[in-house]
Image (cartoon, grey):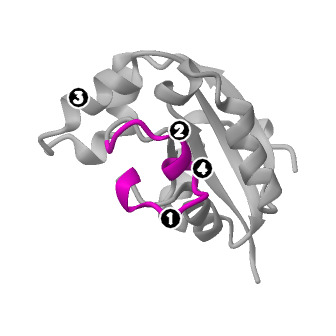
Amino acid sequence: MAIERTFSMIKPDATRRNLTGAIIKMFEDAGLKVVASRRVHMSLREAEGFYAVHKDRPFFGELTEFMSSGPTVVQVLEGENAIARNREIMGATNPSEAEDGTIRKLYAESIGENSVHGSDAPETAAEEIAYWFAGTDIVG
């Protein structure tokens, strides 16, 4: 098994409800280690830059407005198969389709306000990590 890093974000709907610690505990209990973390209140411009891949999608405006509506926690998780493991812990994007015990099943309010974001591939993880962190910010 490969040790890898992935990007993880706790979204405004979860930080607003004070779920940051509970969500981080789920990652750590599943064997992932937080090697970088900070709380940010992203601007609309930062949200648009981060989600630029979706700029032509109909939900882009709603997504970026939501993501800039309150604080988020951006973090780098490390562990064996961290990308796949993180996605497993998060659950399906649509909370009604998420497995029992996953973050989205437990905490998501809707498909749009689904509490967490995680990278879907090594290339995406590298890009998303670099968007929020300098290499010196990550301490394994």
Image marks 1 and 3: residues in contact by CB distance under 8 Å? no
Q: Earlier in the sequence, mark 4 or mark 2?
A: 4
Question: What residue sits right under mark 3 in the picture?
Answer: 62
Task: Report whether residue 8 is seen.
Answer: yes
From the image, tell me which residue sits under label 1. 99
Query: What separation in Å lies between label 1 and label 4 (alpha carbons)?
Result: 21 Å
Q: Which residue is mark 4?
A: 7
53 left or right, relative to 130? left
Place residue 92 in its image quadrant.
bottom left
The relative height of residue 39 versus residue 95 in the rendered view (above or below) is: above
Q: Position of residue 11 (x, y in %)?
A: 50, 32
Front tag of 1 and 3: 1
The nearer-to-camera label among 1 and 4 is: 1
Between disc 1 and disc 3, whose residue precedes?
A: 3
Distance from the alpha carbon under mark 4 to that under mark 2: 10 Å
Disc 3 from disc 4: Cα separation: 22 Å
- Judge from the rendering whether residue 49 lies leftward or rightward of residue 10; answer left or right: left
Q: Secondary structure at mark 4?
A: strand
